[in-house]
Amino acid sequence: MLRALVAVLAIIGVIALGIFGPRWLMSEDRAPADQGEVLCDLLNDTCSWEQQGRNWQAQLKKEGVQGQGTEYHLTIKTDSSQPRLLAVLRGESMYLGEYPVPMARAGLAPDDGGQLWEARFTAPFCTTDPKMTWRVDLQAGMDQETAMPVKLTFIAEGRA
């Protein structure tokens, strides 16, 4: 009798794992939103934030369509003195890898003298879904990135 009860419970457990397991594994991670991270759409807004007492601004503009897809122009303005700056593209809606985008120093901002950084890039696109949400993380050169209080995202449109 005990053996039959254990077998039934094991079968129910396997069925429950088969039903609820994939949902649990594919659920989105809600931790960053709980930590006060603010979302900012780079294509529609100039994203501004303060980090370690320094002011930052990020802006993204479409430059046109090239052979590889849409070209984007990323501008970062900061009053932080950075020897190097690197933007890293990471898939937000779907993981398609990480793509480093080296930023070039573009001089000082005319309004307040903060450093300007620029980069032009074409975001990779997904062949199964023409719209892809990307996240842009900033880091000083190849050093480990710092936790940003804002999540910089944009929706890239691939070839349809």
Image (cartoon, helix red, strand yellow):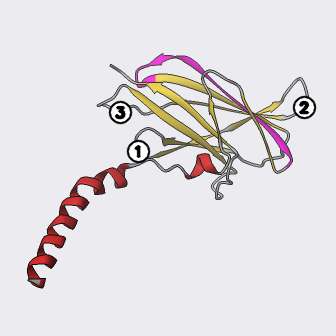
Secondary structure at badge 1 equals loop
Q: Residue 22: horizontal and vertical position, in percent? A: 29, 53
Look at the picture and state if 84 lies above or below 132. Answer: below
Please give the label number shown on residue 126: 3
Q: Residue 157: horizontal and vertical position, in percent? A: 43, 23
Q: Quadrant of residue 43?
A: top right
Q: Identify which residue is drawn at 68% across, 54% down.
A: 146
Category of crowding for the residue at label 1, using alpha-carbon neighbours closer than 10 angstroms: few (below 14), some (14–19), many (at least 20): few
Point out the tag, 1 or 3, that comes first from the N-terminus.
1
Q: Identify which residue is drawn at 67% across, 51% down.
A: 141
- Give how far apart the Cα atoms at labels 2 and 1 are: 37 Å
The reply to whether dot 2 and dot 1 touch (C-beta < 8 Å) is: no
Instruction: Give the residue at mark 1.
Output: 95
What is the number of callouts on the image? 3
| Foreground pick, 1 / 75 | 1
- Give how far apart the Cα atoms at labels 2 and 3 are: 39 Å
Category of crowding for the residue at label 2, using alpha-carbon neighbours closer than 10 angstroms: few (below 14), some (14–19), many (at least 20): few
Please give the label number shown on residue 7: none
In the rendered image, residue 14 lying in the magenta stretch gets the answer no
Look at the picture and state if 81 lies above or below 116. Answer: below
Point out the tag, 2 or 3, that comes first from the N-terminus.
2
Asked if residue 117 lies left or right of residue 27, the reply is: right
Please give the label number shown on residue 113: 2
Point out the tag, 2 or 1, that comes first from the N-terminus.
1
Q: Identify which residue is drawn at 43% across, 46% down.
A: 97
Category of crowding for the residue at label 3, using alpha-carbon neighbours closer than 10 angstroms: few (below 14), some (14–19), many (at least 20): some
The quarter of the picture where the N terminus appears is: bottom left
- Span shown in magenta: 53-69
The residue under label 2 is which amino acid type? Gly
| Foreground pick, 94 / 138 | 94
The residue under label 1 is which amino acid type? Tyr
The reply to whether dot 1 and dot 3 touch (C-beta < 8 Å) is: no
